[in-house]
Amino acid sequence: MEITRFAPSPTGHLHIGGARTALFSWLYAKSKDGKFLLRFEDTDKERSKDEYCESILNSLDWLGIDIDSEPVYQSQNIERHTKLAYELLEKGFAYSCDCSEERLAEIRTEQQKNKQKPKYDGKHRNDNLEHKQGNVIRFKMPDSGYTSFDDEVLGEIKVNNIELDDFIILRGDGNPTYNFSAAVDDMDMGITTVVRGDDHLTNTLKQINVFNALGYKIPRFAHLPMVLSESGKRLSKRDGALDLFEYKNMGYLEPTIINYLVKLGWSYSDQEIFSKNELIKFFSLDSVNSSPSKYSEELLNWYNNYYIKDMKINDLVTLIRNDYNISYNLDTNNKTSEIFNLMREGVKTLIELIDISEFFYIVPDYKEINRSIIEDSKNILENFNANLGSFSFESHETLEADVKNYIKDNDLKFPQIGKPLRIILSGRENAPSISELIYLLGKKETSKRIASFL
């Protein structure tokens, strides 16, 4: 059975890059009828926090990325990691080292001076030092040949072993290091394919040798190229590397994020919109792009507009009521579903939808408007308001017909009544049609706003 995992460090919230890794790992497992597991690599005691674990779990839940067993916490496996580190020491796959920080710093300085790649010089590699408190345990990397693997995305990765470092697997304080702990946990969890970012390539080379030393079958690896900003630089928070709930709070929908994430490095034919079932059916690591992807706010907004318009209007209203803080009371207008259905046409986010619909519930602020447009039409507006009671509000269609007839019967041109009325009713020059505004505001509120303004 195919088993994948997502292994975040709970030192922060789940951001867009991590969410893509989780999604690709989940899709691959589900496409193979396998299992998707979660492991919190929480051995950084100072920075790892329960609140971040909870946040990551909530983010995955929001995206519908279900986990097939309880999360594993790496910090709870330290005894197991330590035991295996000592076993490798006893079997000659690792060695004790008592080099001081000062000596290691001198080595690094000299290597950098000589433009060499910094690495431990192997001083105690063959000394068989007796291990004692304060010493570290270093993994004995092969000193000849190559470490290589066929990456599911990047193809063959091959490195001369002489370039690899005898890295520490157990620190002087007795705590295991990330690369060793991650390999042991992958082994114990039965992980068959590791999907993660390409910033882990060096770690993979180390962990492959750990797997070999432990006698465990090496899992397959799929390294995802990083997501870059639109300018081609490393993605920062300013460029869109926000945590998932920031996107949710900004008014982005779950299917928007799912479809956008898969577009960051994966495609299928010319299809742009996918259901979850379609993604599971079509997803393969062979189709993941081996080049970095670029974040695109324009594409993200295109997806969100599509899903906002595609959502059943009653479900959309319910979502807004339940999940968003609204500065006005939706119950002051009984046509909320019709209002949001009209206003959602061109919006990018739910927050934008909420903001641009405000004038249907609260009298707009007229500070920024061009009052001369209204002054020139004052008599026309007064007469229109006096006749408003005769209009039919049975439906938008009947009201629209009455407005057109009024304009015709009074020998008016549409802009004479349309432009000033739109400003009075909405507080803006660009707004829905006059008949739509009047119908959705209602006879009483429309008449009140005209009279109050004049």
Image: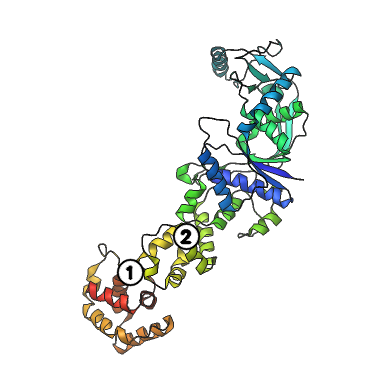
The image quadrant where one finds the C terminus is bottom left
Give the image location of residue 190, x and y in percent: 73, 38
Specify the amino acid type for callout 1.
Ser
- 438 with respect to 202 (left or right): left
Q: Are marks 2 and 1 in contact (CB under 8 Å)?
A: no
- Snapshot quadrant of residue 131: top right
Q: Nearer the viewer, residue 163 or 98?
A: 98
Q: Nearer the viewer, residue 37 or 427?
A: 37
Residue depicted at x 54% and y 66%? 310
As helix, strand or loop, the secondary structure at mark 2 comes to: helix
- Snapshot quadrant of residue 162: top right
Q: Which of pointers 2 and 1 lies earlier in the amino acid sequence?
A: 2
- The 10 Å Cα crowd at callout 2, few under 14, some 14 to 19, many 20 or more, is few
| Residue 386 to residue 297: above or below | below
Tell me, for residue 277, which label it has, or none. none
The answer to whether residue 31 of the structure is visible from this angle is yes
Tell me the CA gap for discs 2 and 1.
Answer: 26 Å
Give the image location of residue 374, x and y in percent: 24, 73
The image quadrant where one finds the N terminus is top right
- The 10 Å Cα crowd at callout 1, few under 14, some 14 to 19, many 20 or more, is many
Tell me, for residue 322, which label it has, or none. 2
Give the image location of residue 311, x and y in percent: 54, 65
Specify the amino acid type for callout 2.
Asn
* Circle nearer the viewer, 2 or 1: 2
- Disc 1 target residue: 426
- Snapshot quadrant of residue 291: top right
As helix, strand or loop, the secondary structure at mark 1 comes to: helix
Residue depicted at x 42% and y 80%? 396
